[in-house]
Image (spheres, rainbow, N blue to C red):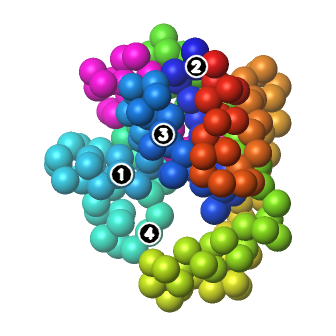
């Protein structure tokens, strides 16, 4: 069973929701880039301190720091049996750096699990989530902008992982349980 997984999908595809179930099923940590950054900053690691300075300056944390933080996280004991990476990589450059990092650690990916969705059906889902969670900044315009950014920068990673024979595509449409069942079958 696949235990070293990159989870890809458009905003609203259900990555975070499904990662919880995958984590429980496989017994491996769900690792999100945002969580890693916050943990490294809180722990005061050298890379965390660098990231903190960048974030406090209002800038985006660069690939080199994100890779460093990913390395720090993936060498921890709970990742020895596997992991679910969510939110990283986001670009081809990050994917190539991750490939090199995992080769260096002797822990290559088992698969890239891609949740596929119909963008026109996802926009209403995200608008409803924004309303429920009180996300005033999540309006149709901002959601469509994030979708375009995903299509331009992250969607090309599907071809990267397909070329390496690692892609597993699962429809993210339907109920949470329906999607979870499809994921379980695909990872078995």
Q: Are marks 3 and 4 in contact (CB under 8 Å)?
A: no
Residue 59 numbered mark, or none = 4
**Location of mark 1 (residue):** 35
Mark 3 to mark 4: distance in Å?
A: 33 Å
**Location of mark 2 (residue):** 2
Q: Are marks 2 and 4 in contact (CB under 8 Å)?
A: no
Report the quarter where the C terminus lies. Answer: top right
Left or right for 131, reference 76: right
**Location of mark 3 (residue):** 21
* Label 1: how many Cα within 10 Å (few below 14, some 14–19, many 20+): few
Residue drawn at the location 34% of the way across and 34% of the way down:
73
Dividing the picture into quarters, in which one does residue 71 lie?
top left
User: SS for tag 1?
Assistant: helix
Residue drawn at the location 24% of the way across and 53% of the way down:
41
Q: Is residue 135 above or below residue 92?
A: below
Q: In this picture, which residue range is highlighted in magenta?
A: 72-94
Q: Name which of mark 3 and mark 2 comes first in the sequence.
A: 2
Q: Name which of mark 1 and mark 3 comes first in the sequence.
A: 3
**Residue 105 location (% of width, % of height):** 44, 16
Q: Are marks 3 and 2 in contact (CB under 8 Å)?
A: no
Residue 98 numbered mark, or none = none
Left or right for 15, reference 42: right
**Residue 83 location (% of width, % of height):** 45, 29
Residue drawn at the location 66% of the way across and 54% of the way down:
175
Number of numbered callouts drawn: 4
Q: Nearer the viewer, mark 3 or mark 4?
A: 3
Mark 1 to mark 3: distance in Å?
A: 18 Å
Q: Name which of mark 4 and mark 1 comes first in the sequence.
A: 1
């Amino acid at each position: 069973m696949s235990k070293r997984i990159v989870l890809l999908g458009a905003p609203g595809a259900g990555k975070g929701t499904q990662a919880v179930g995958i984590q429980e099923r496989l017994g491996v940590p769900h690792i999100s880039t945002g969580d890693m950054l916050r943990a490294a900053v809180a722990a005061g690691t050298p890379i965390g301190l660098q990231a903190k300075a960048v974030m406090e300056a209002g800038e985006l944390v660069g690939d080199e720091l994100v890779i460093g933080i990913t390395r720090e996280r993936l060498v921890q004991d709970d990742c020895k049996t596997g992991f679910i990476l969510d939110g990283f990589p986001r670009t081809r450059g990050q994917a190539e750096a991750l490939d090199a990092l995992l080769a260096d650690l002797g822990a290559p990916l088992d698969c890239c699990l891609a949740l596929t969705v119909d963008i026109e059906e996802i926009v209403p889902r995200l608008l409803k989530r924004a309303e429920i969670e009180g996300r005033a900044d999540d309006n149709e315009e901002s959601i469509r902008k994030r979708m375009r950014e995903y299509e331009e920068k992250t969607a090309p990673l599907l071809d990267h992982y397909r070329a390496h024979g690692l892609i597993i595509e699962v429809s993210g449409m339907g109920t949470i349980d329906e999607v979870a069942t499809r994921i379980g079958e695909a990872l078995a």
